[in-house]
Amino acid sequence: MIEDKNPQRTTLGALGEFGLIEHLTKDVEINQPTTIKGIGDDAAVLDFKDKKIVVSTDLLIEGVHFDLAYMPLKHLGYKAVVVNVSDICAMNATATQITVSIAVSNRFPVEALEELYDGIRTAAKVYNVDIVGGDTTSSQKGMIISITAIGEADEEDITYRVGAGSTDLLVVTGDIGAAYMGLQVLEREKQVFQVNPDNQPDLDAYTYLIERQLKPEARKDIKLLLKALEIKPTSMIDISDGLSSEIMHLCKQSNVGCNLYEDKLPLDPQFMNVCEEFNIDSTTVAINGGEDYELLFTVRMEDFDKIKGNPNFSVIGHMTQESEGIHLVTRANTKIPLKARGWNALSTDEDQE
Ligand SMILES: [Mg+2]
């Protein structure tokens, strides 16, 4: 693991907390016009003029949200930023700044944190967000990362979970389920590695799935796409826990029901193949697997022509009156009540909510 791969190690104690922060943030650039003051004072100063501000925060804990046995630190840093930017995208807003706080035990050398920060900086560049603050401190055990993302939007563009109408169409971006199967592949390889460390895994057949798990992307392009198509979604959420639980959130907050169609779910061919290999039902994974970081939203029926045939969007269902409930309509045309099961629940078979 990390210790073995790093021939050159600098202990955290050698730099001290302030030295470490300075060391990690010395190359941080400021690109956003809304950033007046970034790192280097007691607080950052931002100026958004007449825009509305959206703020979202996430906590990632080693052993709970990530496993360093197969998650390279650079990817972890990248993903930590992406999951936060995704929440800003889910408000139909544009991410502009992040703060990054990290707690680590002294089993991590400075070089490991450099790698983590490298991923954070790369994502900040890709998503054009300024790193404007944060904290580093020690933990007794393991690594904890907390990122807060700040974004901006015009008031009329902001999209909430509440707002879906009972005749609206349900739309998802990209494809779903791949990140969960990527995790299954990585877990399997980890077990093989534990039995036989000399075994070099051949992961060619799983590249897309593994990338979706280790290096997901937030759909910051969707806000622009929808604007260009002159569509304002009536409600929106990002898919972090899984399609079914996100549908439940939209329905609950908007007081509507939903029919989700099994044959409309957008699934990647590699995903289908690997579900078969693992002998797992692809629909179950597609609706319960999480971490895809795609966007799920509703649009008015009149907007159907604007998104029809667009490769970025799949219409997967429609909203109904609340009294009709929330259902999956199977290929055989039977209606099954949809349950909100987070992706963690797949293995335990228990409701998470
Ligand atoms: Mg979210």
Image (tube, rainbow, N blue to C red):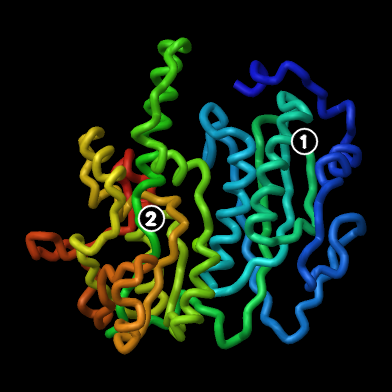
Q: Which residue is mark 1?
A: 138
State the residue in front, 45 or 172: 172
The residue at 85%/38% (across/down) is 20
Residue 30 appears left or right of 353: right
Identify residue type, mark 2: Gly
User: Residue 348: which quarter of the image?
Assistant: top left
Q: Residue 92: x and y, percent?
A: 54, 74
90 shown above or below 349 = below
The residue at 79%/40% (across/down) is 137
Circle 1 Cα neighbour tier, 10 Å, few/some/many (<14 / 14–19 / ≥20): some
The residue at 81%/56% (across/down) is 29
Residue extending furthest toward the left: 332
The yes-or-no answer for disc 1 within 8 Å of ligand 1 is no
Callout 2: SS: loop
Q: Which residue is mark 2?
A: 242
Circle 2 Cα neighbour tier, 10 Å, few/some/many (<14 / 14–19 / ≥20): many
- Whether residue 150 is visible here, answered yes or no, is yes
- Whether residue 248 is visible here, answered yes or no, is no
279 shown above or below 171 = above
Q: Residue 11: x and y, percent?
A: 82, 24
Identify residue type, mark 1: Ser
Marks 1 and 2 in Cβ contact (< 8 Å): no
Residue 191 appears left or right of 45: left
The residue at 83%/47% (across/down) is 27
**Label located before the other in sequence (1 or 2):** 1
State the CA–CA distance, disc 1 to disc 2. 33 Å
Callout 1: SS: strand
User: Residue 8: which quarter of the image?
Assistant: top right
The yes-or-no answer for disc 2 within 8 Å of ligand 1 is no
Q: Quadrant of the N terminus?
A: top right
Q: Quadrant of the C terminus?
A: bottom left
